[in-house]
Image (tube, rainbow, N blue to C red):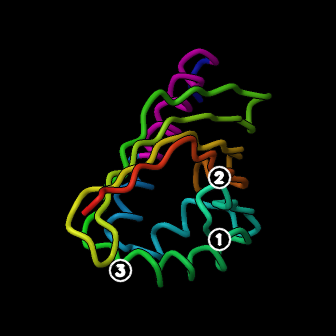
Amino acid sequence: MATPDLQRLADRLDIQDWFTQYSKHVDGHHWDAWKALYTEDAHLDYSSAGFAVGNRDEVCAALAEAMPALPMKQHFITNVDIEFDGPDLARVRAMFYNPMILPGTTGVSECGGYYHHEFVRTPDGWKSCSLREENLWFRTSPE
């Protein structure tokens, strides 16, 4: 077992890597891998962007249906602010920037905001048990 300081550093790196995996899986349409990032009973809320709210499987089904319609999308996630509450719980706020091309358009639209997560340590590593997206802005291309 790592020393407490080394364990906390490893935890931070694991949670930061979670966001890399999230981006890779959502943009690549790897839905089984995307679901594995969350606990089975996770609650996800994308309502600030006018999208799905529900459990992990419901939101995954909505994403799997909606995302292929976007000819281009990328998720950039940065400024991952992690606050630990004991050894097995973390509250995280991370900024996102998401350029995309909306169906039927050729110009780039974009949005940005915060992801608010609660992470729990599981036997399979850190997983999100709660997500609330806070979409702060959305700009639609005039094209």
Report x, y in % for residue 127. Answer: 62, 52
In the image shown, does 139 or 4 lie closer to the viewer? 139
Compared to residue 118, the image places residue 32 above or below, namely: below
Q: Label 2 belongs to which residue?
A: 128
Seen in the picture, residue 123 relative to 118 is either above or below; the reply is below
Residue at the image position 42 percent from the left and 40 percent from the top = 77
- Residue type of the residue flagged with mark 3: Ala
Callout 2, which amino acid?
A: Ser
7 within the magenta span: yes
- Residue 52 marker: 1
Q: What's under tag 1, amino acid-wise?
A: Ala
Disc on res. 69 = 3
Q: Residue at x 51, y 75 (%)?
A: 63
- For the residues carrying marks 2 and 3, which lies nearer the camera in this image? 3
At x 46%, y 41%, the residue is 96
Q: Gap in Å between the C-alphas at discs 2 and 3?
A: 26 Å
Left or right of 94 in this view: 19: left
**Location of residue 82 by image quarter:** top right
Q: Residues within 10 Å of mark 3 (few under 14, many from 20)?
A: few
Tell me the CA gap for discs 1 and 2: 17 Å
The magenta-colored residue range is 4-19
State the separation of the CA atoms marked 1 and 3: 16 Å
Q: Main secondary structure of the magenta part?
A: helix
